[in-house]
Image (tube, rainbow, N blue to C red):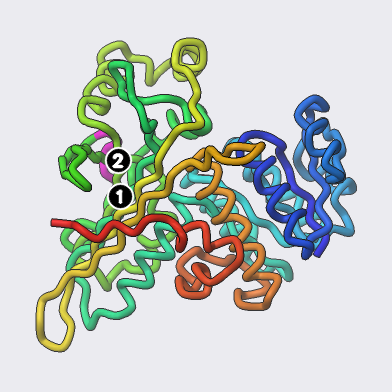
Amino acid sequence: MKIALLGAGHIGETIARLLHGSGHYDVTVFDKNAASLQPLAAEGIKVQTIENVGPGSAALVRGFAAIVNALPYQLAIPAAHMALEAGCHYFDLTEDVAATKEIMRIAEGAKTAFMPQCGLAPGFIGIVAAHLAKSFDSLNDVKMRVGALPAFPTNALKYNLTWSVDGLINEYCHPCECIHDGEKIDALPLEGLEHFSLDGTEYEAFNTSGGLGTLCETLEGKVKNLDYKTVRYPGHRDLMQFLLGDLMLKNDQELLKDIMRKSMPATMQDVVLVFVTVSGMKNGRLVQEVFARKIFAERDGARPLSAIQITTAAGMCAAVDLFRQGKLPQSGFVAQEQVSLPEFLANEFGKAYQQSRQVESIG
């Protein structure tokens, strides 16, 4: 399968190596930064520089079976239009709600498939929640919690950069879709603070945008309460609220991003926490089911991988691979909840989640 991969950044390079290494894909990586492409070219992966992403550059990717977009969320809509014009299938990692809704519109009547949100959250978390929900006669609560956290927090925010600063601030600043008492509403970001303990470690969780993917539309009218919250170490939310609200940096997000890039070190030593609870009625009884995983960075070998690289790249590669195998719709909009969790975990790429440590002791 011939793949045009857009973006050779932190996640894109990992996707490129995984797809290329599987032997099932002919991958060409496009990026505007030639220096970012050099390590991949040295490994025998095809690379090409690209100035702009959008309809005008569709000629560059015409003839490819699919576009895999690993660029920042702001380029999701132009990349989807590019795929439509070129006649390619389309996959991306976007967590942006507005971009996803526009891609749904672009996919209407398309002869090719459009599958955004193929990462961790949105992405894998929605696959898990939909799988658990299917086994209930009726649903009360679906709670989805995900955190990409430094393994060794040392600063006041108890946070290090593990992924895109653009995506981080975006999810902290936009309304959060959820279902409350059967009604679909928009909740405020950074609100809904809760605390919990897992494996002896204390965490907090709060509303952030985009993690639900399309589950609100899928489960509307079927669930009483549905929400997604980001997991952090205690105290993080209050400091972000101070920065975004009290210092009004919500109105100058580029300044905040610049400050974080300059003052907050990135880390490859991270852990990803996935925590989903679903409650409802089964055979006349009120029951709850839980799915919990901790995925750790891989420090062995010549090329260490962070936990967020592993989980995000695995989500994308598994989606593309299941599509190649004919296990997903081949045209129109494809939602994450259309992916079978058992098939995902059995996939050569999805096994990254299956082989992680399952958390058994949950109160």
Which three-letter amino acid code belongs to the residue tagged 1? Arg
Compared to 162, does 20 lie above or below? below
What residue sits right under mark 1 in the picture?
A: 145
Q: Residue at x 45, y 11 (%)?
A: 263
Q: Report the disc number at residue 9.
A: none
Residue 77 x %, y %: 64, 45
Q: Nearer the viewer, residue 149 or 302?
A: 302
* Mark 1 element type: strand
Identify residue type, mark 2: Val
* Disc 2 packing (10 Å; few <14; some 14–19; many ≥20): many
The image shows residue 191, relative to residue 140, as above or below, that is: above
Give the mark, 2 or 1, whose residue is nearer the N terminus: 1
Q: Name the residue under label 2.
A: 231
In the picture provided, is 59 more to the left or to the right than 246?
right
Counting from the top left corner in percent of width and height, residue 253 is at 45, 19
Q: Which residue is drawn at 83% across and 48% down?
A: 28
Which secondary structure lies at badge 2?
Answer: strand
Q: Quadrant of the C terminus?
A: bottom left
Q: What stretch is highlighted in magenta?
A: 186-190
Queried whether the magenta region covers residue 189, the answer comes back as yes
What's the CA distance linking mark 2 and mark 1? Answer: 6 Å
User: Is the C-beta separation of discs 2 and 1 under 8 Å?
Assistant: yes
Callout 1: 10 Å neighbours few (<14), some, many (20+)? many
Say if residue 327 shows up in the picture. Answer: yes
